[in-house]
Amino acid sequence: LNTRLLNLAEAAACFRAVLDLAPGDPIARIELIGALIGMGDLDEARALLAAGGLPPGEAAKLEAALAAERMNIQKTFN
């Protein structure tokens, strides 16, 4: 719900708490990565994505979102 309301920092904190309790939870990891991308924390998002353990289709979507956000940031600074 927090990600839908764009309370990304709060959502990220919730997903981190879930991952503390259930480190292998792919849904929490997917949502955390999405929140991090939305907040512009691309390094942490990339690290979580690189750790693996996500369904291939979801990993590909997140890779694409991460690449798109990197391109947006580069356009901003060029």
Image: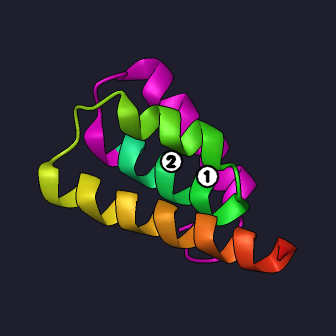
Residue 31 falls left or right of residue 59: right
**Amino acid type, mark 1:** Leu
Q: CA distance from mark 2 to mark 1?
A: 6 Å
Q: Quadrant of the C terminus?
A: bottom right
| Residue nearest the viewer, comparing 5 with 57 | 57
Residue 11 falls left or right of residue 52: right
Verify CB contact (< 8 Å) between mark 2 and mark 1. Answer: yes
Identify the secondary structure beneath mark 1: helix
Residue 33 x/y as whole percent: 49, 49
**Amino acid type, mark 2:** Leu
Identify the secondary structure beneath mark 2: helix
Q: Residue furthest right?
A: 77
Is residue 24 rendered magenta in the image?
Answer: yes
Q: Which residue is mark 2?
A: 32
From this view, report whether residue 22 is shown above or below residue 13.
Answer: above
Residue interval drawn in magenta: 1-27
Q: Residue at x 55, y 76 (%)?
A: 4
Residue 58 falls left or right of residue 23: left
Mark seen at residue 36? 1
